[in-house]
Image (cartoon, rainbow, N blue to C red):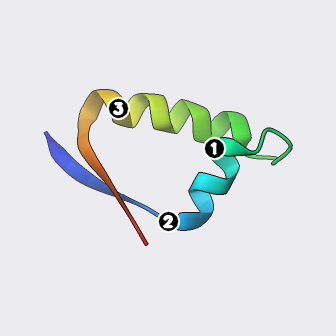
Amino acid sequence: MSNIFVDTSGWGNLVDISQPYHQLAVNFYQKTTTFFRNRIST
């Protein structure tokens, strides 16, 4: 397993359900949990 970089703006989409890319961010987060060890952010 390796690390993945996640830009800070991605976290906003993940936690705020009113954001247009919220569901995409949720799907991405779930997939990275399976394939990557750590998420590195700015």
Looking at the rendered structure, the kind of residue marked 1 is Leu
Left or right side of 36 for 19: right
Q: Which residue sits at x=63%, y=44%?
A: 14
Circle 2: residue type: Asp
Residue at coordinates 41% horizontally, 30% vertically from top-left?
A: 31
| Disc 3 crowd, CA 10 A, few/some/many (<14, 14-19, 20+) | few
Residue at (49% x, 65% y) in the render: 7
Q: Secondary structure at mark 2?
A: loop
Q: Nearer the viewer, residue 31 or 41?
A: 41
* Residue on which the image places disc 1: 14
Which label was assigned to residue 26? none
The three-letter amino acid code for the residue at tag 3 is Thr
SS for callout 1 = helix
Q: Is residue 6 left or right of residue 21?
A: left
Determine the secondary structure under disc 3.
helix
Residue situated in front as seen by the camera: 13 or 21: 13
Task: Give the residue pinned by disc 3.
Answer: 33
Instruction: Look at the image and tell me in which quarter the C terminus lies.
Output: bottom left
Tell me which label, 2 or 3, sits earlier in the chain: 2
- Calculate the distance from the C-alpha at mark 1 to the C-alpha at mark 3: 14 Å
Query: In the image, is residue 11 above or below residue 18?
Result: below
Q: Earlier in the sequence, mark 1 or mark 3?
A: 1
Q: CA distance from mark 2 to mark 3?
A: 16 Å
Which residue of the protein is positioned furthest toward the bottom in this rendering?
42
The quarter of the picture where the N terminus appears is top left
Label 2, on which residue?
7
